Amino acid sequence: MTSALTPPAGSPPASSWSAESAGARPLPQGAEEALVREAPDLIAVRRHLHAHPELSGQEFQTTALVVRRLTGLGLTPRLLPKGNGLYCDIVGAADGPMVAFRADLDALPLLDSKAVDYRSTVPGVCHACGHDVHTTVLLGLASVLVPLAKRGALAGRVRLIFQPAEETVPSGAPEVIAAGALDGVSSIYALHCAPQFPVGTVGVRPGPLTAASATLEVRVSGAGGHTARPHLTTHLVDILGRVIVDLPGVLTHRMDPRWPVSLVWGAVHAGEAFNTIPVEGTVRGTVRSLSREGWHEAGAIIAKVVPDLVAGSGADVEVRYVEGFPPVINDPGAAALIAAAAARALGVGQVVEAPVSMGSEDFSYYLERVPGAMIRLGVTAPGVTAPYDTHQSGFDVDERAIECGVRVLAHTALAALADTGAGEPGKGTQR
């Protein structure tokens, strides 16, 4: 485990955004100075994680690193049943509320194309979604809050959740919840790297932030044959074409307009030869909605519509609709709390409105149980006008975002613990 690394030549040095942004307030009781001192080591941790990524369900070495860091602070992590992932409590006032923060541990099955000294050492695996940053920020939060708890300056308890398998379906969030990580929690927060925002800013949005997702596969089969005699076959390519063209429009008209959905095809396969009608073909895509109702309703409608589109062709059809994650719906009160905390952490002008994303995130499972909010953490260096997006092999961050993220979450923790209206433990709104 490295202890510190020098930022690469030409990159901005780690610095305190509170010193640069109007209206920002330092963390109390020496925590601000401690964070600035800790920043180089946190950068080293992030680079180590980036160089040693692990896929969903395989995050054992990442978990071991997190455990070492937390136990070094005097904390007692609790491993999840499979040993990849954990949660850990920082105990201040025993009679105070408990606020939780979640980070994800897994990387993507993607080549790392960056020419940096912390490039992934695992072929075909890369932290291209910023989970290495999320994990590091939570470790930094622990290093800031533990001394405050020891001084009696923490008005409750803070639970840190390090979740495996965010990038897969089924994902790790239900496993974390089943292990009891939300027991006693009054509110929960998370951040996600956002290359559309410059470092030193965060995006906040009440209500829907990300969409629910589902995968759709339509498989057709029938008698194939020579393209010279299509009347003797079941013309599966033509049938697939009808499904591809007609289903999105029919679905839109059949849906309740209050619950709009998006159906986008991503893959189609039928046959190999130009002069042969195949016996089987498939088309695959995704269905997304900003409402849980639309997410469920779309599957039921598709199951009825597709056979109607294929009817009369002689083809057999199979429809497979698999729900992924529910939508992330930020609690308005929690979103307002973290927005105010971010303004104290970074300055009022550094908090902007986050756009709705049609991507999906399994943080939604936590928000179905406990009020909370996810925010967007700006990670793009000044002057970069066309940053790589997440899930692209060249994705990287301005590492000053780590310090910004810690500062925002630390202010959020202090505000949430002081907020008597944080809600009853473990009784979030069911959506």
Image: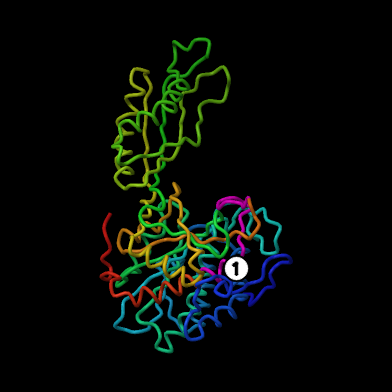
Residue found at the very far front of the displayed protein = 22
Residue 176 magenta? no
Q: Along the horizontal axis of the image, is 291 left or right of 143?
A: left
User: Which span is picked out in magenta?
Assistant: 386-405
Left or right, 184 with respect to 399, comes to left
Q: Residues within 10 Å of mark 1 (few under 14, many from 20)?
A: many
Pick the quarter of the image with the N terminus: bottom right
Which residue reaches farthest right? 9
Residue 29 in picture, x, y percent from top left: 48, 86
In the rendered image, residue 390 lying in the magenta stretch gets the answer yes
Secondary structure found at label 1 = helix
Q: Is residue 108 left or right of residue 83?
A: right
Residue 187 placement (x, y as % from top left): 34, 68
* Front one among 313 and 199: 199
Q: Amino acid at mark 1?
A: Arg
Q: Position of residue 26 (x, y in %)?
A: 50, 78
Quadrant of residue 307 in the image?
Answer: top left
Q: Residue at x 58, y 66 (%)?
A: 49
Please state, as top left, top right, bottom left or bottom right, where the C terminus lies in the image: bottom left
Q: Position of residue 114 (x, y in %)?
A: 68, 56
The furthest residue to the bottom: 151
In the rendered view, would you say 123 is above or below 157? above
Is 270 placed above or below 24 here?
above
Residue name at image x 52 percent, y 75 percent:
140
Q: Of residues 175 and 93, which is closer to you in this image?
A: 93
Write the residue at 31% across / 64% down. Answer: 370
Examine the residues drawn in magenta and state their main secondary structure: loop
Would you name the residue on which mark 1 appears? 400
